[in-house]
Amino acid sequence: MAKIRIYQLAKELGMHNDELLKLLDEMGVAYKSHASTLEDSTAETVKELIGEQRVAEAARRAEEARKAIPHRPPVVVIMGHVDHGKTSLLDYLRKSRIAEKEAGGITQHVGAFEVKTPGGTVVFIDTPGHEAFTTIRARGAKVADIAVIVIAASEGVMPQTKEAIAHAQAAGAKIIFAANKIDLPNADINKVYTDLMQLGIVPVAYGGDYEVIPISARTGQGIDSLLETILLTAELEDLRADPKAEAQGVILEARVDKQAGVLASLLVQQGTLHVGDYVVAGEHWGKLKAMSDSEGTRRSEAGPGSAVQVLGFSELPVAGDTFNWVPDQIAAKEITEERIAERKSLETRPNDGGRARNLADLM
Ligand code: GDP
Ligand code: MG
């Protein structure tokens, strides 16, 4: 094999001759000019070095690009055994938010609401029950970054507590435990600890990783500390979303209002939605005619972490489906028609294979 000359190697690597000569100097390689030949082993070393430099440079650029994307608020779902205080905790959080704003309590249910604290904003999903959370997960979308699992300290871990833990773990959400009803005389935080330990979940108090925050959804005790813990957890997760990306998110709820028509609640996860935008969600599309937030305020745009109610879908989108921005009606129609056709072709297959494949695709 002919030995490679310096200018040939430089060309091969897309470098200037001077750059390569400088590198050879650094490596202590002797040469007369850029026309000198290099030992095979030297050429190999140069290639490896340049390759490593380029990988490092690409990684540095990728990290820079990631850091340029702004932080977004954490999205939290509250789960737990029946009667352990999920609704009460959401009510308390919603109320504290209104008191802060002195807004007189005009709120609108849009499937999620924001709580602003001095340490940052937290978005709480408040779709009825936590079905939405489980359907959304079953459909493959991730909505909650953090699951707050409420355990009544007067009762300890119950069957649905375990289910909630399993769901949260499967969804890849960070878990924070709220030991609720701490105001009751029979509240026993130690029982909560030992119950959790039996599941292999070691609380911070026992040297483990799981935060267990004593709270009372009735008196409000400990709720500040719960919010702080949520924000601290979110900080470690380094959650970011690009407001300039194409808007994307999840349908939280959808219903038909006799007067207004189809109302859908969306959580924007990335990008910014604008009134007038077209979106597709599953087999349905809409042109956003109007948007409003949980304070009932009309919005012309909604960025990452915003939950808004929108008007403009012609048919009911499915809760749990992902929505995506599309440029226009032509795209919206073509994409949804394709999806409908695809589903129909799977449904008309003789055996049940199509359906199973479809489900498997979603998981
Ligand atoms: P959910 O089924 O998990 O939504 O539970 P709820 O929020 O409906 O609460 C069940 C019951 O427990 C209600 O009667 C609440 O008033 C009560 N409750 C909830 N949180 C507390 C609390 O912190 N302290 C006390 N004493 N009662 C609570
Ligand atoms: Mg409830």
Image (cartoon, rainbow, N blue to C red):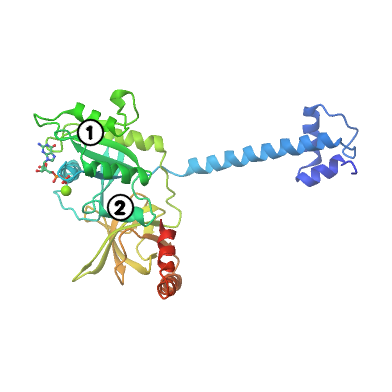
Graded by Cα atoms within 10 Å as few (under 14), some (14 to 19) or many (20 or more), the crowding at tag 2 reads some
Q: Is residue 281 left or right of residue 85?
A: right
CB-based contact (under 8 Å), mark 1 and mark 2? no
Q: Which mark is residue 334?
A: none
Q: Residue at x 22, y 69 (%)?
A: 260
Question: In front: 294, or 179?
Answer: 179
Question: How much space separates mark 1 and mark 2, taking CA atoms?
Answer: 27 Å
Graded by Cα atoms within 10 Å as few (under 14), some (14 to 19) or many (20 or more), the crowding at tag 1 reads few
For label 1, the SS is helix
Position in image of residue 136 (x %, y %): 33, 55
Quadrant position of residue 128: bottom left
Residue 209 in sight: yes
Q: Is residue 76 left or right of residue 30?
A: left
Position in image of residue 268 (x %, y %): 36, 54
**Could you tell me which quadrant the C terminus lies in?**
bottom left
**Which residue is tagged 1?**
224
**Could you tell me which quadrant the N terminus lies in?**
top right
Q: Residue at x 36, y 66 (%)?
A: 276
Rendered view: 341 above or below 288: below
Question: In front: 14, or 84?
Answer: 84
Amino acid type, label 1: Asp
Amino acid type, label 2: Thr
Position in image of residue 343 (x %, y %): 41, 71
Quadrant position of residue 159: top left
**Which residue is tagged 2?**
134
Residue 80 in sight: no
For label 2, the SS is helix
Question: In front: 82, or 147?
Answer: 82
Q: Earlier in the sequence, mark 1 or mark 2?
A: 2
Position in image of residue 192 (x %, y %): 21, 31
Q: Is mark 1 within 8 Å of ligand 1?
A: no
Rendered view: 27 above or below 169: above
